Image (cartoon, grey):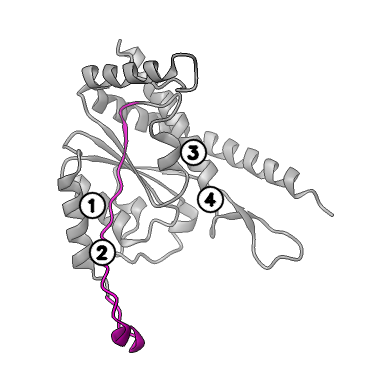
Amino acid sequence: MEDLIARTFEAYRRLLSDIEQAQSANIRKAAKTCADSLAQKGVIHVYDTGHLVSRELINRVGGLAAMSAFNFSFSVENPNQHRQAQGETGKASFETDAMLVSAAIKRSHMRAGDVLIIGTVSGKQVIPVELAIQARDNGITTIGITSLRYSSQLQSVHPSGKRLFEVVDLVIDNGADYGDAMLEVEGMDRKICPASGIGAAAIMWALVAGIVQEMLARGLQPTVFKSINLPDGPEIYRQTVDDYIRKGY
């Protein structure tokens, strides 16, 4: 039987090599954009649709204190057995989604001059697209991490008909193919091992490195987290947060 573990590592090595060759220029542009914002006490916000990026980047060893997770939801609890039995459920609408996005931005710490990174593989859903549109309308620079090969073959659910890569200021392609999964396996009717999570995480850490390089070139030392598990780790962590509060970057 074929060695699927070896094939998986080879596929991810190839993916990362392809991203490095094809996306380094865009990552450098994004790093400069983020450094421009940080130099003016801006914030880098990260919105991800449920994959690796938002948990991997925020409050993380070796990561930037100036990166902030951005999440929001609207929950309604109103069960009714009679109406559920009739197949009646609450229906979403674009107007509701648009108002939710607007309220989330207004209630957030996002301000004009900040950067918002939006991660979504397909880039077709209403919320990420609407978020990018409204963020730009509010003077926030938007960076989309998505799959161009995948998204370009999908129809957007947003009323504008546009996908994420068509509405953000800068696009970084995570390298995922159509359908995202990479490995065909004999005896399986579908591929395994998605490209998007690993690709996006590698892009974001390369972006962090680029931001650090840009900031240091300007004589600004960005605040970076150390491990809380090191000796004196909790004290070091508190000092790091204090440094960020004081400097703003």
- Disc 1 and disc 2: Cα gap in Å? 10 Å
Image: 174 above or below 211 = below
* Circle 4 residue: 176
Tell me the amino acid under the disc marked 4.
Ala
Inspect this view and state whether residue 222 appears.
no
Magenta region, mostly helix, strand or loop?
loop
Q: What residue is shown with label 3?
A: 201
* Residue under numbered circle 1: 133
Residue occupying the point 56% across, 48% down = 195
- Mark 3: few, some, or many residues within 10 Å (few <14, many ≥20)? some
| In contact (CB < 8 Å): disc 1 and disc 2 | yes
- Magenta-colored stretch includes residue 72: yes
Percent from the top left, x then y, of residue 44? 29, 34
Viewer-proximal residue among 6 and 178: 6
Residue 128 seen = yes
**Disc 4 to disc 2, C-alpha distance:** 24 Å
Q: In the displayed image of the protein, which residue is found farthest to the top?
A: 219
Apparent side of residue 127 relative to residue 120 in the rendered image (left or right): left
